[in-house]
Amino acid sequence: MSFRIVCFPISVLCLAVCAACSFASAAEPVFTTDIQPIVRSRCVKCHGPDEKSANVNFATITDDKSAARQRKLWRKVVAQLEAGAMPPVDEPQLTAAEKEKLLAWMKRAIETVDCNDPANQDPGPALVRRLTLSEYNRTVRDLLGVEFDAASVGIANDVSEGNSFGNLAAALDMPPALLEKYFAAADQLLDRLYGVELSSSVDGRIIDQARVSREQLFSLKPGTWRKSDYEVAPPMGSEPRDAARALITPLVRRAYRGQQTPADVDRLLAIFDRATTQQKSYGESVRVMLKAVLVSPKFLFRIEQDDATAKGIVRVSDVQLATRLSYFLWSSMPDDELLGLAESGELSKPEVQEQQVRRMLADKRARSLTDNFAVHWLQIHKLPVARPSTEFFPEFNSNIRQAMFDETTTFFDTLRRDDRSLLELLNADYTFANEELAKYYGLAEVKGKELQRVQLPAGDPRGGLLGMGSILAVTSHTSRTSPTMRGKWILEVIFGTPPPPPPANVSQIKEETDKRKKDVQTFREKLAQHAHDTACAACHQKMDPLGFALDNFNAVGRWRDKVGDQPIDVSGELPTGEKLNGAADLKKVILARQDDFVRNLSEQLLTYALGRELEDFDDCPVRQITAQLKVDQHRFLSLVLQIVKSYPFQHRRAAN
């Protein structure tokens, strides 16, 4: 009897629990039954088969499985919904219940990732990537030993759309006019290598580099180069064609980054033979052959070639991995050690890869991570044309701009060289300054023009990116700070959640300069009035409190407590309810969301390393990278190693 009494309540409890589970499960929105009808009624008019605004077509998402794989799209939609930007004000609006249901489903879809799903084990397409201007300059330097700036022949710096990186394959096309400039660049490079045009206008160091390079290339004894142009001969006792083959074979191995074939060398020798039959000298014939290398697709493009049997997803070869590594960390070609390990099949070993990453990060060529990644990610490439004017800020001169730029780049490069924590970007107890910048900031005394590490007092607001003049200046207007621009920078650069663009025809706030008027509003009052507009409110509520917290820093990065005789109001409240009262509180808020920052930085560096925008199937690698980063105390080396070990870095789809 007692057995039945005990069992009965338990069975009832089990039934109750199961019923509760079923109810909770049923209460969760399902795409096809709960979400798709709302999307069809509210969104498909502008984002459907007839009109694909922002290149979005919701009509193609027809079932729960395909909907679950649209995490990138749902992130954008969530941002638009939370900002109140969608639906447009002139269209029927969502009810509160519809909006809540959409946001709940989309946020869950974003966070729910099945890393065992084959659709999430995709390394991305095989890419053909032209060398960027920076990569080209560095590659010819390492190939020929000659410093050269291809911008001198009109090859412009590569700029991707928005704030994306310039090394993304989608932006690196080759129009005919650009190809002509590469031919001109090859001629100028060879002029320098051969000694032509080495006039007094060329730096003496470059002349020395060219001399050493040509002696090595042509197997000459130091100091034996003859003055007459192209007066170079094959080594004593060698046939010209044999000497040409001996010269070009190792060069083309390095220029084609280990993907040369015997047929490549034969084609180049055929060019040498043709020049010889035209009565050109040995030196002139070699020059024609070298030019063919410098304008070859195998040199100007990074092409990962497949063999005939490659199908589906393949692991990149050791040679291809060496090129990925070198252009990720050095923006240049693999050196002999890296290429040798690849050709011997050793580079695919994890321990060898880690040893090479450590070696390459310690090399001065890894400064390219700062120059080509950090400068663009942090948007300080805009500093030379930042808006603050010397008319309003005479102290903001070219020396100060340069010192601010150098402060930020030196800080980032120190994280790389010393393998420091990435969280120091958010809050650090040191910075870098020279004598002029230290006085400008009001820091401890520094002597000299060279930047030095400066220890900051405890709690100093300068610590980290948000106290650096470069960041503060690029987020300011001509004559004043811009809390909105600063808040937008934090959302975009720190958290990777840029707000949507402002509505069309949004009005700009005009400054009142007539101080004789008694009813002149403060800028903060006018911004609040502007942000009260329903089309603007949601975004400004996110951005403005973040920006106002930094308002003790003026438009050019100097600290202030007042504007005129009025104390500065740096208070604010975020939509999440968090209250801010200055830079110290802002840092606490950001550090409380450090996981979001680390994820964004991981995504940004992975994007740069892969040369393409990330897709939904990249979520799993990003999660694995950030999880290991946390274990490794967010060290710089750990981030780079995890990216190198990641699935998309080690694999790709076959082109066949």
Image (spheres, rainbow, N blue to C red):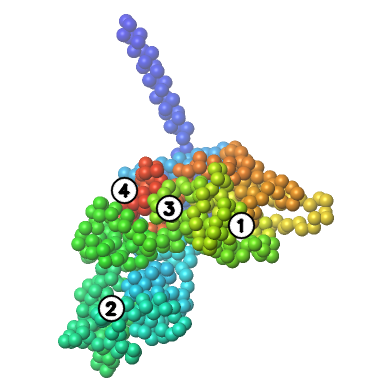
* Dot placed on the residue nearer the N-terminal end, 2 or 4: 4
> As rendered, which of 191 and 322 lies closer to the eye?
191
Label 1 amino acid? Tyr
Q: What residue did someone put label 3 on?
A: 415
Q: What residue did someone put label 4 on?
A: 118
**Circles 2, 4 touching at the beta carbon (< 8 Å):** no
611 to the left or right of 538: left
Residue 48 seen in render:
no
Residue 222 at x, y percent in the picture? 28, 80
The quarter of the displayed image where residue 584 is located: top right
* Dot placed on the residue nearer the N-terminal end, 3 or 2: 2
Residue 41, placed above or below residue 654: above
Which of discs 4 and 1 lies nearer the camera? The answer is 1
Element assignment for label 1 = helix
Mark 4 → mark 3, Cα distance in angstroms: 36 Å
Circle number at residue 217: 2
